[in-house]
Image (cartoon, rainbow, N blue to C red):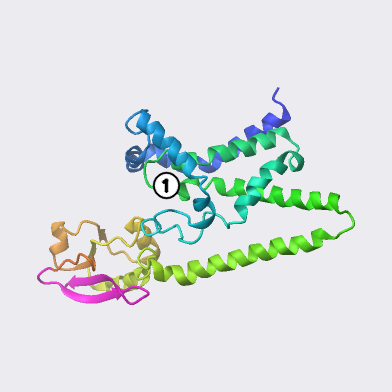
Amino acid sequence: MCSSDLWNVCGAAGIWLLLSAPALWMWFGDPTTTLRTHRISTFGNGVTLDALRLFFTNYAKQFDWSYLATTGDPIPGATWRYLAGFGAFYWWVVPLAALGLCFLPRIVPALWARRFIWLWLLVYPIGGALTNEAVPNAPRTLAGAPVFCILAAVAIAGILDALARALPRANLRGVLEPVFVAGTLASTVLFARYYFVDFVHVYPNAWNSGTRALFAVIRAEAPHYARACYSLYPSFYALHTYARYYLNGVTLPMEENPNDPICYAPGTLLVTDTTVPIVRPGFHRIALVRDVDGLPFAIVAGRT
């Protein structure tokens, strides 16, 4: 019979499998996803010395102080999710998480739980190490976020308990707890201000500013046209993702190959990037869409 500790581990693994089922289904069952996985896989061409070297290099980079606490991803302009000047965590989370490893045996007495936390910490970089693209990569190592936070919480509990034992008559908990709360609130406000106020002007097109205005034009013109052809992708996600949101209820067919013969025919809306505009006889400009800073974002032309 399984011990209670083993049942806990089995239950946690079962919950993980249940939550991961949609992603696993797409990963192994969708041909497009499978091909991309092979293309970016560290071991896509076999287990070689170069591939192993790349794996361990990428694994170690997920623990860089600069990535974790100060600058985030090394190429923020290309992978817009990462914010220059901010790490994957608030800077104070990282030293607290390291300290939490020291307090772990005292605060978490169950051996199975400590082993699980250690395993979690050691496994989290694998999502970035198994890919040959730019690292570190926070979305692929998102599993590390909870364990760092757990370890930081363990450290806070350990610090408060140690101070209570060392200075039993001093009400240090009443002093330190507000400090921890204030630090968390201050960090959250600073991050939110940068993300929602400054960042949109640093990488406006990556933020998709202009996308809403673009689809507003398409929605307004949709009744007069039979199709919309696109040579512009609003961001790093599929065009249909945006259309489902911004064109909800609009039954205008989409064509993502602007060179298709149908995209030359009357009744066509032509949506192009301003950096590589498409000019065709018979099409007239309907709108020049601008981003949040007033810079050109897209051109909408039509042939009725």
The single residue placed furthest to the left in the displayed view is 281
Residue positioned most to the right: 169
Q: Position of residue 71 (x, y in %)?
A: 48, 57
Quadrant where the C terminus sits is bottom left
What amino acid type should be assigned to the residue bearing mark 1? Val
Q: Position of residue 281 (x, y in %)?
A: 9, 70
Task: Say which of 251 and 70 sits in front.
Answer: 70
In terms of secondary structure, what is the magenta stretch mainly?
Answer: strand
At x 35%, y 39%, the residue is 34
Q: Is residue 217 above or below residue 56?
A: below
Is residue 37 shown above or below 190? above
> Horizontal placement of 87 versus 293: left or right?
right
Q: Please tell me which residue is depicted at 34% across the width and 73% down the height of the picture.
A: 291
Residue 233 in percent (x, y) is at 30, 60
Residue 242: % across, % down: 37, 61
Toward the viewer: 104 or 265? 104
Does residue 125 appear in this view? yes
Q: 22 left or right of 40?
A: right
Magenta run includes residue 289: yes
Q: Place residue 249 in its image quadrant.
A: bottom left
Rate crowding at label 1 as few (under 14), some (14 to 19) or many (20 or more) other CA atoms within 10 Å. some
Q: Secondary structure at mark 1?
A: loop
Which residue bears the numbered disc 1? 135
- Magenta run includes residue 232: no
Q: Quadrant of residue 12?
A: top right
Seen in the picture, residue 294 relative to 185 is either above or below; the reply is below
Q: Residue at x 70, y 60 (%)?
A: 180
Q: Residue furthest top?
A: 1
In the rendered structure, which segment of residues is drawn in magenta? 280-304
